[in-house]
Structures are given as structure tokens and as C-alpha cells.
Image (spheres, helix red, strand yellow):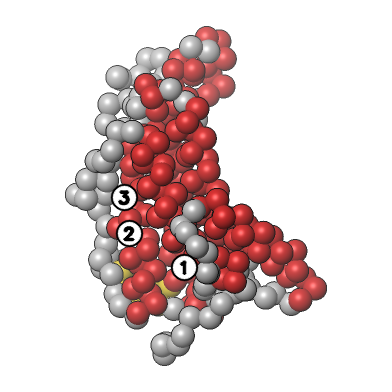
Amino acid sequence: MGKRALGSTGIEAGVIGLGSWQLGNTVARVAHRAAGLIAGINEQGAQMDDLLPHVLAILSTTPQRWNTLAHAVPSDLLDRKPKRGEWSALDCLRHLVTTEREVFPVRLAAFRAGRDFAAYDPDAAGAVEGADDPDELVAEFETLRGRSLQDVAALSPDDLRRTARHAELGQVTLGEMLSEWAGHDLMHTVQGERAMMQPFIAGSGPWRSYFTDHDAQPPGSEV
């Protein structure tokens, strides 16, 4: 596939030219523009694939969710592992910060430049190492994600067909990588919430059986 300049979805106009990297302004403008695009798809003939506004919607809300958790949830609950060897909510947040710094923006730049990219091993990369202060982690995440939102907002539907070679998975498309990015956000946010569920599940008495899908250590299981 030949190289071409990245196009604009129209969302770009809502975020480029901001005087700072403040996530609040970026998210508000992106969300407003994405909502307008979604509403106008039927009458204007699919201005862009559904994927782009959907990805932007997820990527823009994840920092807000973690901001709420970091400021409202006691630190001992954030740092509580569901069981030995599994990540706490704070571990999940550290991982999201690491991948926002070292993985997804790097891959997006590789697609734009027509370069291949390496695989990412979260264990080898020390994915859960980093700051212990949830507020500090959230602040870094918001700054990094604000930059990412601007880059994703500048993409067009044609850009989704760009290809690159992943060291382990082979040829992948930019659209597939964006889907993984949004899914990755949701997966680790749910994982963090599941970790915080555990003391409440354990204390729910006869209702515990209702939490079977989320119970990390059901009665009778090995610790």
C-alpha cells in the first residue's frame, strides 16, 4: 500500500491548536465532534467508519474513569491484589500509563511512517513498575492520553487500511491496532475494578454465589 499524507476526519479541527495539553479541553472537543459525526452518518453518507468515533469515545473516557477512582477510592483498596500473582487496580493503572508512553503512540507513529514495530511483553518491560501515588499516575495518564487523542483525531477512514508488520503477529492494520487500543483500555479498567470487588464479594455472605464470574478466590479454592 502506497504512502499518503494522513487525512483529517474533521475531529482534528476540534483539538489541534489548543494552547495546552489539558485533557479536559481535548476530551470535550473530541467527544462533541465525534457525537456530531455519529449523528450525521446516516444523512451524510458515512463520513467515516464507525470505528474512529467509537475508539475516540473509549480513549477519551478512560482517564476520567481512573481519575474518579484515584481520587475517591482509598489507597489500600486501590493497591489490593485479588490474589497472589494478579494485578491490583493500581498495577492496572501503572500498566496503562506505561503503554500510553511506550506502546500505542509508538505504534501509531510506526504506521504513519510506514515502519514495522516490535512486540511488547508487559512482564519483561516491567509494566507494573512506577509511581505509587494514584494522583501522580492519573496526571501523567491524562497528559499522555491528551496527546494521543489529538493524533487519533487526525486520522481518516482511509488511514485505517495502513499496514505494518508486528514482530510476533505478522501484518496488521491500523484499524486493528486502534481496536486493540480501545479494548486494552476497557480490559484493564475492568480488571482493576474486579480487583477492588474482592473484599465486597467475600463479605457478601449468601449473595456471594451471584459473583461467580468475578470471584478471585471462591470458597474451597486454593489460595
Q: Which is more toward the observer, 1 or 149?
A: 149
The residue drawn where x is 38% and y is 24% is 75
Q: Do the CB atoms of the residues marked 3 and 2 lie less than 8 Å apart?
A: yes
- How would you rate the neighbour count of disc 2 (Cα within 10 Å): few for under 14, some for 14-19, many for 20 or more? some
Position of 20 compared to 45: left or right? left
Looking at the rendered image, the quarter that the N terminus falls into is: bottom left
- How would you rate the neighbour count of disc 1 (Cα within 10 Å): few for under 14, some for 14-19, many for 20 or more? some
Position of 10 compared to 200: left or right? right
Q: Which is more toward the observer, 104 or 148?
A: 148
Question: What residue would you read off at disc 3?
Answer: 98
* Residue 134 in picture, x, y percent from top left: 38, 34
Q: Which is more toward the observer, 220 or 206?
A: 206
Q: Residue furthest left?
A: 124
> Which SS class for mark 3?
helix
> Which SS class for mark 1?
helix
Q: CA distance from mark 3 to mark 2?
A: 8 Å
> Which SS class for mark 2?
loop
Q: Amino acid at mark 3?
A: Thr
* Residue 83 in picture, x, y percent from top left: 32, 25
Q: Amino acid at mark 2?
A: Val
Q: CA distance from mark 1 to mark 2?
A: 14 Å
Q: Which is more toward the observer, 146 or 202?
A: 146
The residue drawn where x is 49% and y is 78% is 159
Which numbered dot is residue 103?
Answer: 2
* Residue 69 in picture, x, y percent from top left: 48, 33
Question: What residue would you read off at disc 1?
Answer: 151
Q: CA distance from mark 3 to mark 1?
A: 18 Å
Q: Residue furthest top?
A: 205
Q: Amino acid at mark 1?
A: Asp
Q: Earlier in the sequence, mark 3 or mark 1?
A: 3
Occupied quadrant, residue 195: top left
